[in-house]
Amino acid sequence: MISPLRIVNGRIYDPANGIDGVVRDLCLQDGKVVDEVPRPLVAHRAIRCPWSRKGAVMRVLTERTKDRETDTLDGLKVFVDGGWAQVLPDPAEPVVHVYAEGTSEDETHRLEEEFAALVESIIQDDDA
């Protein structure tokens, strides 16, 4: 299944139907034009984290998710079936951000809870 796609303010050309550069939103799902696609729900939680624990949070999370598909370009992003969770230390505040997006609102909140709990447990663990 291909992820739904929303193109905002796209310029549409369809000479067969007399459309020449109309600007509008275009929604695609499974390779077909559709009237609407679900808007993604991204959950966010900011967790207080002492500066001295940020490195440990990222190191331990990386170790605990080594068997999953991840991306470390910007923090740590962990991919799960149809969604993802991202843990990102704030560069200016003693905070770690947890972002999540799932295939449904419930899945999004479950991912947010799972990764927020992991971050909080690592912050509390002095041995990490």
Image (cartoon, rainbow, N blue to C red):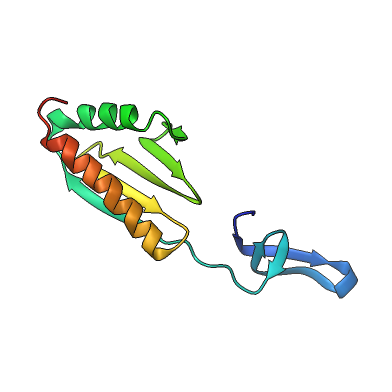
In this view of the protein, which residue sits in the foreground, 92 or 42? Answer: 42
Image x and y of residue 15, in percent: 87, 68
- Residue furthest right in the image: 16
Image x and y of residue 86, in percent: 36, 43
Quadrant, the C terminus: top left
**Residue at 44% over, 34% down:** 70
Q: 65 above or below 29?
A: above
Is residue 42 visible from the viewing direction of this image? no
**Residue at 11% over, 37% down:** 124
User: Is residue 44 toward the left or the right of residue 40 in the image?
Assistant: left
Image x and y of residue 107, in percent: 39, 58
In this view of the protein, which residue sits in the foreground, 75 or 81? Answer: 81
Q: Quadrant of residue 58?
A: top left
Image x and y of residue 16, in percent: 90, 70
User: Is residue 11 toward the left or the right of residue 39 in the image?
Assistant: right
Q: How many marks?
A: 0
